[in-house]
Image: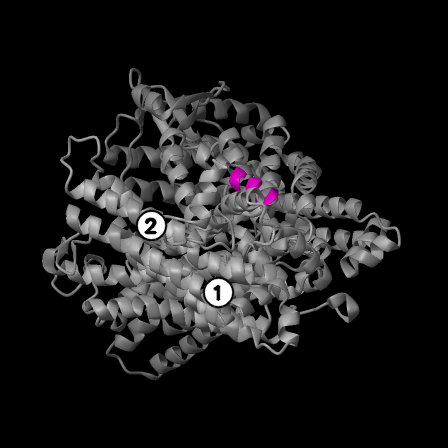
Amino acid sequence: MSQFFNALVSKGFFGKRIRNGVHMFSLILFVVVIVCSVSNLLVPEQSIFYVSTYTITLLGKYLCFALLALSVDVVWGYCGVLSLGHGAFFALGGYGMGMYLMRQVGDRGVYGNPDLPDFMVFLDWTELPWYWFGMDQFWFAIAMAIFIPGLLAFVFGWLAFRSRVTGVYLSIMTQALTYALMLAFFRNEMGFGGNNGLTDFKEILHFDLQSNETRVGLFFLSALVLIIALLLSQKIMKSRFGRVVISIRDGESRARFLGYVTDHYKVALFVYSAVLAAFAGVLYVPQVGIINPSEFSPINSIEVVVWVAVGGRGTLYGAAVGALLVNYAKTKFTAVLPDGWLFALGALFVGVTLYLPNGIVGFFEQRISFLKGDSSRELDSFEVKDKKSVSEVEV
Amino acid sequence: MTSRMYTLLPQRDWFWWRILCTVILLCSIAVKPCFANSKDEKKEGYTLLESQQGVLQKGLQSDEELMVEYEHLIRQLPLANFKEKLALIEKIEQKGGQHAYDLLTSLLSGELYYLKKDPDILVYAKKYEGDEYQVKELGEESESKLLSKLDLKKIYKKVRTNNRVRKGIKLSIARLSLKSDSESNKINALKAMVLTIDPVTASAIESMYENERSGKVKEMMSIVLAVHTLKTSQDMTAVSSSKVNQAIVLLGDRLEIPVKNTLVEYKGFLEESEIQSDQKSQLLKELNKALTAIEEKNRFYVFVEKLFFGISLGSVLLLAAVGLSITFGVMGVINMAHGEMIMIGAYSTYVVQLIMPNFIGYSLLVAIPAAFLASAIVGIIIQQTVIRHLHGRPLETLLATFGISLLLRQAVRTIFSPLNRQVDQPDWMSGTLEINPVLSLTYNRLYIVAFSILVFIVLVFVIKKTSLGLNVRAVSQNRPMAKAMGVRTEWVDAMTFGLGSGVAGVAGVALSQLTNVGPNLGQAYIIDSFMVVVFGGVGNLLGTLVASFTLGVANKFIEPITGAVLANIVVLIFIILFIQKRPKGLFPQKGRAAE
């Protein structure tokens, strides 16, 4: 077994050296996605190799969650900024996409109004609010869906990091941020459908959202974006910028004393992370078919954090693994024992923080490097003991 | 104005006047039945003298006979049509006294049912809990029984009323309560009449006015009459303007809403009417004066009310946040399960009331220590099993305690139910302190404000004057140094956590009197409590006090302008901006301890 891992890690497939988990995960993901897509589109339905469209959509949803988890890992695992409000960026991106899809419905809504979405007709609105203009253009809608969360992250990050709000303070503030947004989006006056949110979409870029092909396409696209985000994030973290970010995580005061303007690094990273989360939201909404204010609820954001913790912080692909595993468990669990899930989730929070501080991936990576006898191999994830001593010094 | 009436009775004659009144009243009690039954053969020839001789005996007897007639009347109620019902109700009003009052009020609120098989049998059916109804037979001292809604509908039928009948019932009730002995009942009845005053009632009040001895009731009566004057003068312009003028002056500083409406209505009427005269402009001037005076007074009391609501919200926040502030200050960790400690306290109150259902009045006094202990024990268990092992890793502590909060909430859902539980309010906490028609403060909120300040003072005492407090302060200022000086920091951590959680439990007792007790009770307050701690500065009791009251009052003052949701958002944004200026809160720790 260990021999196999050894071979896998050091030599890899296709003669090309795959030196780290991100590459390996991306490769496996790519293969799985291709196989799934092909088995859905080309294999006949009665065959045992057929993958149902339901499964495809479910997997697509998981991939979006994996991307969201990756965005949290980027700031938490590499910069020590625990954001409990990433659900806000995710949902804002989702709302951007939802607005575009809503405009695409056109006059096929229940009320048949060509300009106004159903809920506006229902509320007796006579014209589109100004912020809905241009959202019928795909490129503009996507640009806004990415730009607005990025802007919010920039303003919030700039305000927070400049005044050196750190640690639990920052976590609480991010939680308050998403909470405030949730309250706001629940209001009908906001013009985003209030309680019910945006739903009842018909098509995206004139492709029917219900058709197999569109669903497989979205699934494939989600995987592609996830892989690109993984590789890009790894590139960033290996760069000079990434090294500074890690140094901020391990000792912010020291990094500052060495002359780095740590606020700028943190803001830039926070915005990058928010953009990733927004992409996840953009891809999530057409697959699920609804976006409503409950996506902003603080518990959603904090659940994302536990995915990252389960998978392993500071490894990038660990976050994705955690998101996939936990969500799969959630789907299975809620089907069998609906009441048990919250118990399981609560226990997961406590268990992972107490007994698995580096997550599943961290656990296995340590095993592997131990088996290889390669003690020099460094992990990007938190070294718990070191972190503890650092924080003791700072206190 | 009303004092003019008052002076009719010279002060020194008060005592004799009272005795005279009592005698008259006694006589009238005795006489009343014989007038009421004058058509009755047996009662004929009953003289005043006789009745005075045998007040007690005869009075009782006639009461009994009245009751028989009354019983007979109410038996007809279920099957009568609406028109007949109206007539019946009036008769019932005359015969029944207190019984009729009870009957009519329950008829009005739709709680009167009759047996389908035998319409002679009437029952009160009061909603008890959920779908259960408490059914009690009328008249007899029978045991009440519980029936589900379905069973109730199967066996009994509601005595139906329509709008006209209900109006008649209301009038009857008002008249009945005017006859009642208690001052407050009379005043309430009069207040109810202001809206629906008609010439019949007005003349009835006018006749009662002279005999009324309570000043307050007389004042209220004159108000009702003045409103009536304005209304009638609108209809026929027959009332002399001096009388109207008098009425306006009388109503000038009243806060009752119907009074104001009448004035506004009258003003509209005056402005529209064609007649031009000095009198009219004079009246308009008076009217405007009266209206602005009312407006000003109103505004002041609305301000006071808002302030009170703000303080009340602030005191709840104080209770919820002060425990959080202590644990955060000493251990540097955020306890996300703090809201669940509040929830445990609230459920302890519920359980205590289940254990002692006959002593609801005392249950709260038992619940306070019980909730403190329950939450403190749970808190210490959490600290010992989880938080202790995550020392020095605040973010992980946050996650772990969030997991615990999920576990506790789900546990409560499994043990009790996902539905809200009703915690009874003791009698001494319910009701309102009515200062005037615009401003009334509920007793439960008043008690909670007082209670939270009491808890705060006790906490300050514990922190400042006890050895535990000394240790707590030492550890929060400099943990390694305190340890070096021999302070058992582990023990202090556990005790602090227990104390903070216990206070949260006590907050739960208070909250159980304000809102429903459910698994999500704590969640509603937790984010606001965090804001209080962030705003006030960590581990600073005074900061928590100031911050919670500031946020509470600010919230309630922004709310009417922007709505409740936006008020929340505005406060959140304010705090985010505030910590730009002062990242360590209002009252940061100073000196080397701050680093």
* First in sequence: mark 1 vs mark 2: 2
Quadrant of the image occupied by residue B478? bottom right
Q: Residue furthest right?
A: B485
Find residue B321 and report its horizontal and vertical position in percent: 63, 55
Residue A223, relative to residue A133: is it above or below? above
Quadrant of the image occupied by residue A229? bottom left
Mark 1 and mark 2, same subunit? yes
- Residue labelled with disc 2: A14
Q: Amino acid at mark 1?
A: Lys
Q: Chain of mark 2?
A: A
**Would residue A90 be visible to someone looking at this image?**
yes
| Nearest to the observer: residue B59 or residue B164 | B164
Identify the magenta region: A347-354
**Would residue B259 be visible to someone looking at this image?**
no
Find residue B260 and report its horizontal and vertical position in percent: 41, 66
Of badges 1 and 2, the one in the foreground is 2
Give the colouring mode of the picture: one colour
| Nearest to the observer: residue B569 or residue B430 | B569
Q: Position of A161 compared to B542: left or right?
A: left
Instruction: Look at the image and tell me in which quarter the N terminus of chain B lies.
Output: bottom right
> Dot 1 lies on which element?
helix
Residue at the (46%, 49%) spot, across then down? A10
Question: Which numbered disc covers residue B221?
Answer: none
Residue at the (68%, 60%) spot, across then down? A390
Q: Determine crowd level at label 1: few under 14, some 14-19, many 20+ residues with C-alpha closer than 10 A.
A: few
Q: Amino acid at mark 2?
A: Phe
Q: Chain of mark 1?
A: A
Q: CA distance from mark 1 to mark 2?
A: 24 Å
Question: Which numbered disc covers residue A238?
Answer: 1
Magenta segment main secondary structure: helix
